[in-house]
Amino acid sequence: MWYTLAASLLFLPFYLRSSLILLAVALGLAIFNQTLLPPGMIALSIIGIVALCCGMQKKTHAFSLPGEIILVFSAVALMLHMIPGFNNLIIVSGEQAGPESAPFTFYYNIDKALIPFLLLACLPTLLKRQAKPPANSLWWLILLMSMPLLLLLATLAGGIKVEPHLPDWLGSFMLANLFFVCLAEEALFRGYIQQRLSLLLGDKQALLIASLLFGLVHFSGGVLLVLFATLAGLIYGLAWLWSGRLWVAALVHFAFNMLHLLLFTYPFWQHIPT
């Protein structure tokens, strides 16, 4: 089921019909294995009807704005796991990536993975829009180099520590992080929020606001995490702005997370008193 869901997201920017067929198969399998329970089925049925009404209309109509509001709030609720009826599969529970890493838990999240489909229904340019590349292509190299530099800065601030490791659940983490985390978060914060704000306020203001909002959703990790998530959001936002492709931002986000996992304490340094 999870591989089918990942495949539907992989095909989404290129073959919409095939992507939707794979999504339907994945949801059917989720019902069969009780990953998707009746409350979630009811919620998705309602959200799906709204998405169809929004996505099938070529021109603006009376339901356009209310429908978009419903879909955006639904996407936020799915991201925060606020809608009942999703029995997400736990992959790792309370394990440590390394001896000085804090205990870590992650899931395969079917609810969060649905976010790109919802937002695409209300914003057709979610996955692809006009690129606004930098004047000099060397800025791309600077952008990519800023990722390890940001992680090293986090070590100086005491949030993480250099600790290379190769956990045995790496493959599952890569699947979950790319398709069910990075793509979903980039669809909301860059593909939708930053793009909508760009139309209203301009690219620079949109980049700053979307990055700050991305940082604020990490408030449970403390002020330091909010700060570094905001800075990371600037990196992802520039990747989206320069490329015009949601997948580019998602891959940059994924690369940052992989650098963090493989070379540093993950998700943060567990300070143990001596």
Image (tube, rainbow, N blue to C red):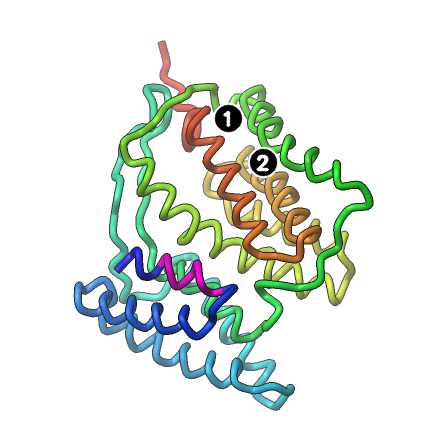
- The residue tagged with tag 1: helix, strand or loop? loop
Towards the viewer: 164 or 10: 10
Q: Which quadrant would residue 263 be assigned to in this image?
A: top left
Towards the viewer: 221 or 268: 268
Magenta region, residue range: 6-12
Type of amino acid at the residue the image marks with label 1: Gly
Q: Residue furthest right?
A: 135
195 vs 41: above or below: above
Q: What residue lies at 43% left-to-right and 48% top-to-bottom?
A: 178
36 vs 274: above or below: below
* Image position, residue 5 (x, y; %): 34, 61
Q: What residue lies at 76% left-to-right and 52% top-to-bottom?
A: 204
The quarter of the image holding the N terminus is: bottom left
Residue 250 marker:
none
Tell me, yes or no, whether the two marked residues, 1 and 2, touch with CB atoms within 8 Å. yes
142 vs 115: above or below: above
Find disc 2 in the rendering and name its residue: 228
Find disc 1 in the rendering and name its residue: 159
Relative to residue 267, is residue 24 drawn left or right? left
Type of amino acid at the residue the image marks with label 2: Phe
* Image position, residue 10 (x, y; %): 44, 58
* Image position, residue 36 (x, y; %): 25, 66
Residue 127 magenta-highlighted: no
